Image (spheres, rainbow, N blue to C red):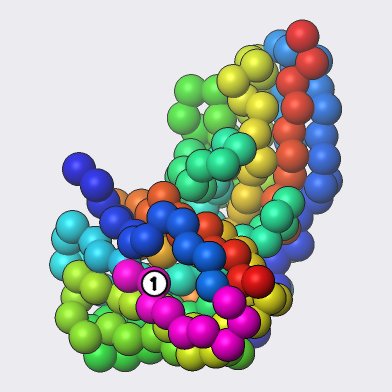
Amino acid sequence: GENVEQHPSTLSVQEGDSAVIKCTYSDSASNYFPWYKQELGKRPQLIIDIRSNVGEKKDQRIAVTLNKTAKHFSLHITETQPEDSAVYFCAASKGSASKIIFGSGTRLSIRP
Amino acid sequence: NAGVTQTPKFQVLKTGQSMTLQCAQDMNHNSMYWYRQDPGMGLRLIYYSASEGTTDKGEVPNGYNVSRLNKREFSLRLESAAPSQTSVYFCARIFQPQHFGDGTRLSIL
């Protein structure tokens, strides 16, 4: 079955710098890759997603890149702000009728 | 717009007791999911349902059962609760529009 690995488990960056979180997946048939942000004590919330027919997607300060050949995808946050501090999860799926497997999460801390 | 509503929000059980966690979505989307999240950990898939009347096992299905009687409701049942099932349980509709419920914080003594 699908396995998703996420690195690093913790990440600390200076405010204003960029943060990059990387994930790899095992099932080459996976075609949907969402990223979630979870603040302490709250539910995960979708921040960006990408499908396998696209190599990159941007939404303001957030971007996701996908390398299907290498089976990895990354989240890029530019100009980090204190409110970016949270746990981020990647996930992979073969579509809406399939299971969705999450990575183990990255705790991002933004230093003032 | 609640999206996905879970009940109860908190529950304490004794070992061996049973209970059902309820989940309802405000749309008729086919796919729904149940996850558990242990403290400081990631989200592990328990069961999912691709459509009304169908369910499939996820990564950690042992000790749980689910029921999808209609498109809006997807319930999770613990038949004989164990301390290892202490966790936060999230019900989710992952595909557009995506929405996680607020979670059920379950403690088993």
From the viewer's perspective, is residue B48 above or below residue A107?
Answer: below
The region drawn magenta spans B14-22
User: What residue is rendered at 30% in x and 56% in y?
Assistant: B4
SS under mark 1: strand
Indicate yes or no whether the magenta region holds residue B19: yes
Q: Which amino acid does label 1 sit on?
A: Leu
The residue positioned 81% from the left and 47% from the top of the image is A9
* Spot occupied by residue B66 in the image (x, y as percentages of width and height): 39, 85
Is residue B63 toward the left or the right of residue A50 in the image? right
Q: Where is residue A48 in the image (x, y as percent from the top left)?
A: 48, 42
Relative height, residue B83 to residue A55 (above, below)? below
Give coordinates of residue B20: x percent, y percent: 38, 78
Q: Work out whether residue B62 or residue B33 is closer to the camera in this orientation and state it.
A: B62
Subunit of label 1: B
Give whichever of B2, A12 is nearer the camera.
B2
Image position of A33 with respect to B17: above or below: above
Residue A93: percent from left, percent from top: 51, 69
The residue sitting at 73% across, 13% down in the picture is: A15
Residue B8 visible within the image: yes
Residue receiving disc 1: B21
Task: Determine whether B93 is above or below A59 in the image.
Answer: below
Rendered image quadrant of residue A69: bottom right
- The image quadrant where one finds the C terminus of chain A is top right
